[in-house]
Image (cartoon, rainbow, N blue to C red):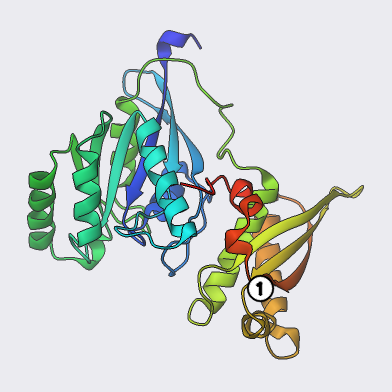
Amino acid sequence: MTEATTRAGFVAIVGAPNAGKSTLVNALVGEKVSIVSPKVQTTRMRVIGIAMVDLPDRSRAQLVLVDTPGIFRIAKRRLERAMVAAAWQGAEDADAVALVVDAERGVGDETRAIAEKLKQSRARRHLVLNKIDLVAREKLLTLAGELNALLPFAHTFMVSALKHDGVADVLAALAADLPAGPFFYPEDQAADLPMRLLAAEVTREQVFLQLHQELPYEAAVETDKWEERGDSSVRIEQTIHVQREGQRAIVLGKGGTRIKQIGARARHELGRMLERPVHLFLHVKVSERWADDPAHYRAIGLDYDP
């Protein structure tokens, strides 16, 4: 395929915490590349998902989606500041920006602040109203008008990312906007995330899904060992870092039942993603000051001093 028939570019997916950015990225890519949980601020790094799109003019587009951490209006802790800095860097580097808004929650202070800052962006801006299945149509039209009054958008989309409703329209419009040029990644690649890091994210998702009412989002997972075995399976050892001994007891559960359940579900998900058997071994460690460890920030692609 010649360069003239291909398009490629980066689109940053931004928005307030829990607007559904990761769910939208997974839907656009067509498979899971970013973790999702009911807990706000699940995404900590800029996860890159890659979608291939065939356009009506017979060109083929590679859409590189940057799923950024949710943007806090006021970031107080170091981790929060690093996440916000990563989100804005993703927006500044992109060819286009899609602002995802939870239609049920409407326009809050965080979304207003994001829209205000996006006025400075030179990238083409798009609005995605998500979770429309939970909102009356009249409210959606009012919300779209209010947001476009704050900041004019090239397109306004109404979707349910969870149900894949309206997602194809978003994908087609974003792809058509991309500049002509060669692809950045192989056509069969869905994400640009090291497997050790992706494996840690899968386990962290299960920690959140099973313990989101009991454990603060600061809990971290690191992949300590990755061993390719002769029978084509993989042995993975990971450490779940918590900040207090009481949190360690919560993760372990009575008689170790909770950690076994977390491990079983993470192993199943990893086996599905890797398409081969996975042997997963989890350890829980109290690391009171991991949130102040520069090495941890570097490991997940964040700047320690944003």
Question: Hey, which quadrant is residue 157 in on the image?
Answer: top left
Residue named by callout 1 = 262
Residue at coordinates 58% horizontally, 62% vertically from top-left? 291
Q: Is 116 in front, or is 166?
A: 116
Residue 78: x and y in percent read: 48, 58
- The x, y position of residue 223, in whole percent, is 72, 56
Q: Is residue 43 left or right of residue 225?
A: left
Residue depicted at x 7% and y 56%: 142
How many marks overall? 1
Side of 19 relative to 1 (left or right): left
Q: Give the residue type that dot 1 points to.
A: Ile
Q: Is residue 182 visible?
A: yes
- Whether residue 157 is visible to the viewer of this picture, yes or no, is no
Residue 76 horizontal side relative to residue 158, left or right: right
Q: Secondary structure at mark 1?
A: helix
For this rendering, which residue is in front, 230 or 89?
A: 89
Residue 253: image x %, image y %? Answer: 67, 86
Q: Residue at x 51, y 74 (%)?
A: 216
In the figure, 193 relative to 158: above or below?
Answer: above
Name, please, the residue furthest toward the bottom. 254
Q: Classify 10 Å Cα crowding around label 1: few (below 14), some (14-19), many (20 and above).
A: many
- Above/below status of 18 relative to 123: below
